[in-house]
Image (cartoon, rainbow, N blue to C red):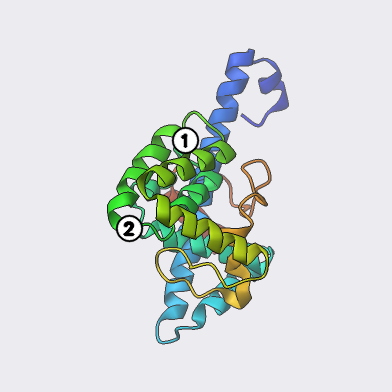
Amino acid sequence: MFDTGELQAMSDSEVLGAIRRAHGAAAYAQAAEVLAVRELYRRRRVGSPGGGEGAAREAAAAVRVEVRWAALLIAVGVALDGLPRTRVAFTSGRIDLAQTRVIAEVARDLPRELVDDIEHTLLDAADRVDPARLREIGRRRVGELDPHGERRRRETDRGVEQGGPATPQPRGSLDPPGGYCAAFTTQSESFTSTSLPLFNTVGVATSPAAFFNAARAASA
């Protein structure tokens, strides 16, 4: 699939299929990384409520990225604890990190009875629209289901952008490492599916479990 000559011999539809397959494989790797960073965070939190900062720094050093990016991955992982359908879709490669992040942001602080509706709405739309449009759909749906709550959320987000009080963290009470996790709620346009860095170099696996095994073999 990565042979230039092979790609050049493909028809347009075959090249598009190759793009879709590669993107799905990348989503597996993204999910594996999020779950691994989330596990590191869980371990560091045991007996140390402030251990989240250390986990973000450790993960950032391991893959040579900014601490706030590692913190964002932790925030997504924590949010997935309360988003079972989204977690399944992400770990199966159906949606990527950018889409997963949007769903987590939209569902943030919603009452449990509304989360199921939001997950269903956004997962259904994720196959048809890009992350920016997905966010618009989510916000509109939240406005329909919980107009007063959505207004409060927007006011809070506006306060963060202007240096006001911190935005409530995603489900799971993530302690923000040095404030870096504010990126999860206030810089939603900073990272998109076209600007996500490739962190891992052990190759693309077919599932998160296989990816972990490949990583373990590469580091042995």
Q: Is 119 on the left or on the right of 9, as rendered? A: left
Q: Which residue is mark 2?
A: 111
Q: Is 62 on the left or on the right of 96, as rendered? A: right
Provide the secondary structure element on which disc 1 rests: loop
Residue 110, position in %: x, y?
Answer: 38, 57
* Residue situated furthest top in the rendering: 11
Residue flagged by tag 1: what amino acid is it? Ala
Provide the secondary structure element on which disc 2 rests: loop
Which residue is at 55% across, 23% downward?
17
Q: Is residue 148 above or below residue 139?
A: below
- Judging depth in this view, the residue of 160 and 8 nearest the camera is 160
Numbered tag placed on residue 126 in the rendering: 1
- Judging depth in this view, the residue of 172 and 26 nearest the camera is 172
Residue 126, position in %: x, y?
Answer: 47, 35
Residue 59, position in %: x, y?
Answer: 59, 68
- Judging depth in this view, the residue of 110 and 39 nearest the camera is 110
- Judging depth in this view, the residue of 180 and 137 nearest the camera is 137
Q: Is 146 on the left or on the right of 202, as rendered? A: left
